Amino acid sequence: MNKKIVVGIDIGGTNTVFGIVERNGKILFDGKIRTSDFDEPEVFVAALYEKINISIKKLGNSHDVMGFGIGAPMGNINKGTIEYPADLPWKGIIPIADIFHKYTDLPVIVTNDANAAAVGEMVYGGAKGMKNFVVITLGTGLGSGFVVDGKLVYGEDGFAGELGHTAIRPGQSNRECGCGRKGCLETYVSASGIKRTLLKIMADSIEPSNLRKVSFEKLDSKMIHEAALKGDKIALKAFKHTGQMLGFKLADVVATTNPEAIFLFGGLALAKDLIFEPAKEYMEEHLLNIYNGKVKLLPSKLTTQNAAVLGASSLVWTSKEV
């Protein structure tokens, strides 16, 4: 009997990565293409499908492909579309599943990349056996996926759970967000957000920091992390402020969904205690008292290298179509 496999695809603003995945989470083959090289989604899908097909053929004839799972910014599981993505080279509503179906009759399931990460955490990561949890992805922006009573929350239009685009300082923040609003959580709690926070602290302080020598274009969250580990006071303040903002918002999340655990994933989460400690402290401080000490704040158990692919592939494995 042939082994069943699924193709997991993560569409990012710069690169699109894919993997051929067995049900147990083993990635048999992976690859990528540059999303930014394609001005038209139809040309992009044609190039991606060809590369995936070549990869599958290298595995021989002992495998059966069951479907394609796609995680993408503003992916809509109800319609199989990507809608008005801020970080992709294409605008408007992209019927990504329909474009794939020009090449295959197999199931093509599309969802928001953070929702895919949540399903991946449930199938392959630390949320195995949990029915109520939240996954927060801390990358260039802030994504989130909510699982309640064992089901991922999609909402009426398929876009539920956009924690990154809830306001943290309504009416008080001038921080513009890529979504067009001001004061969104991701303008504070993300790789780009901590950079903005650090620059604000620098502007309001004369405290010395080696990061003052770094140009705005070159400064990134990894540099801030490395500086904080070396005891740079401004970098430490930036992490503390970022963690506090996250913790404050997570207290509202707990009141809304009553999760067993909240998982942090992504580059900023790799800072470990620098982000986890202030987030946990501030969350507990602002929790409704019936939840104090009950909600775990945990790092994702999916590795950054393959989490996106596993999350996307798990969409197919958990669907009713397979």
Image (tube, rainbow, N blue to C red):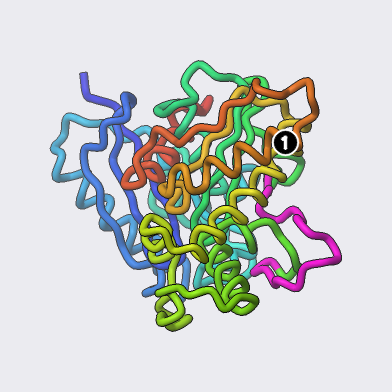
Q: Position of residue 306 (x, y in %)?
A: 33, 43
| SS under mark 1 | helix
For this view, does 174 lie left or right of residue 23?
A: right
Q: Quadrant of the N terminus?
A: top left
Q: Is residue 173 one of those drawn in magenta?
A: yes
| Residue beneath the point at 74% across and 64% down | 183
Q: Is residue 265 above or below residue 147?
A: below
Q: Within the image, what quadrant is residue 308 found in?
A: top left
Q: Looking at the image, how many numbered discs can be counted on the residues?
A: 1
Q: Position of residue 288 (x, y in %)?
A: 80, 29
| Closer to us: 75 or 197 | 197
| Closer to us: 188 or 72 | 188
Q: Residues within 10 Å of mark 1 (few under 14, many from 20)?
A: some
Q: Is residue 4 above or below residue 31?
A: above
| Residue beneath the point at 22% across and 24% down | 2
| Magenta-drawn segment | 161-179
Q: Quadrant of the C terminus?
A: top left
For this view, does 259 lie left or right of residue 220?
A: right
Q: Within the image, what quadrant is residue 83 found in?
A: bottom right
| Closer to us: 211 or 216 | 211
Q: Is residue 269 one of those drawn in magenta?
A: no
Can you identify the residue that label 1 sits on? 285
Q: Position of residue 62 (x, y in %)?
A: 17, 29
| Residue beneath the point at 67% across and 41% down | 282
| Residue beneath the point at 70% across and 56% down | 165
Q: Position of residue 230 (x, y in %)?
A: 36, 59
Residue 23 in view: yes
Residue at the limit of the structure toward the right, as seen here: 171
Residue 74 in view: no
Residue at the limit of the structure toward the front, as seen here: 207
The main secondary structure of the magenta stretch is loop
The three-letter code of the residue at mark 1 reads Glu
